[in-house]
Amino acid sequence: MAEQEKHTFPKTERLSSVILIEKLFAGGSKSLPAFPLRIVYMPVEGEELPAVSVLISVPKKRFKRAVKRNRVKRQIREAYRKHKYLLIDPLKAAGKKAAIAFIWLDNELHASDEIEKKVKKLLQITAERML
């Protein structure tokens, strides 16, 4: 990773296209679990899209209170922001683009460092499988 690269997560990297989200969950995508997370990913085509578009989902079924859901989403976002180049750099080198979704699977809160390890592991495995 080069020195000038910033660890940011701009709005342009967020997956907000309803069409892409439906394609991601309708089928044709692959998923990997790393409890308490699951990553769902698929390659995408399009000039205007960033190298990786990300969606983070914490179901209301898991946490009834929005405070807890938001905390988990913040933890996942922060971990992704720190380690996104594990996935972005290989995809850019290969000229590929991807849409990914992080889905929370547990009913309990976890420590940020544990979530960071899982996100890092999922990003590495996804990068290997997409190439």
Image (tube, rainbow, N blue to C red):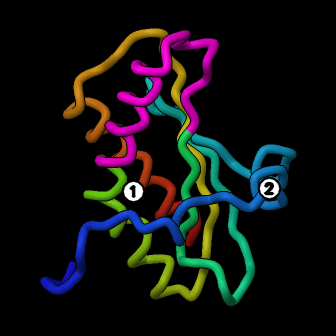
Closer to us: mark 1 or mark 2? 2
Q: Which residue is mark 2?
A: 18
Tell me the quadrant of the picture where the C terminus can be found: bottom right
> Callout 1: few (<14), some (14-19), or many (20+) C-alpha neighbours within 10 Å?
some
Residue 112, horizontal then vertical, whole percent: 23, 31
Who is closer to the viewer here, 104 or 34? Answer: 104
Query: What's the residue type where badge 2 is placed?
Result: Val
- Name the residue rendered at 42%, 66% in the picture: 87
Tell me the quadrant of the picture where the N terminus can be found: bottom left
Q: Quadrant of residue 50?
A: bottom right
Left or right of 117 in this view: 35? right
Residue 92 on the magenta segment: no
Residue 88, horizontal then vertical, whole percent: 43, 72
* 19 lies above or below 92: above
Query: For numbered disc 1, what is the local secondary structure?
Result: helix
Comes first in the chain, label 1 or label 2: 2
Query: For numbered disc 2, what is the local secondary structure?
Result: helix
- Name the residue rendered at 46%, 87% in the picture: 93
Magenta residues, as a range?
57-78
Residue 44, horizontal then vertical, whole percent: 72, 72
Residue 77 on the magenta segment: yes
* 48 lies above or below 54: below
> Callout 2: few (<14), some (14-19), or many (20+) C-alpha neighbours within 10 Å?
few
* 75 lies above or below 18: above
Residue at the far front: name it.
66
- Give yes or no for contact between labels 1 and 2 (Cβ–Cβ under 8 Å): no
Query: What's the residue type where badge 1 is placed?
Result: Gln
Q: CA distance from mark 1 to mark 2?
A: 27 Å
Q: Which residue is mark 1?
A: 124
Residue 33, horizontal then vertical, whole percent: 53, 33
Which numbered marker is on residue 113?
Answer: none
The count of marks equals 2
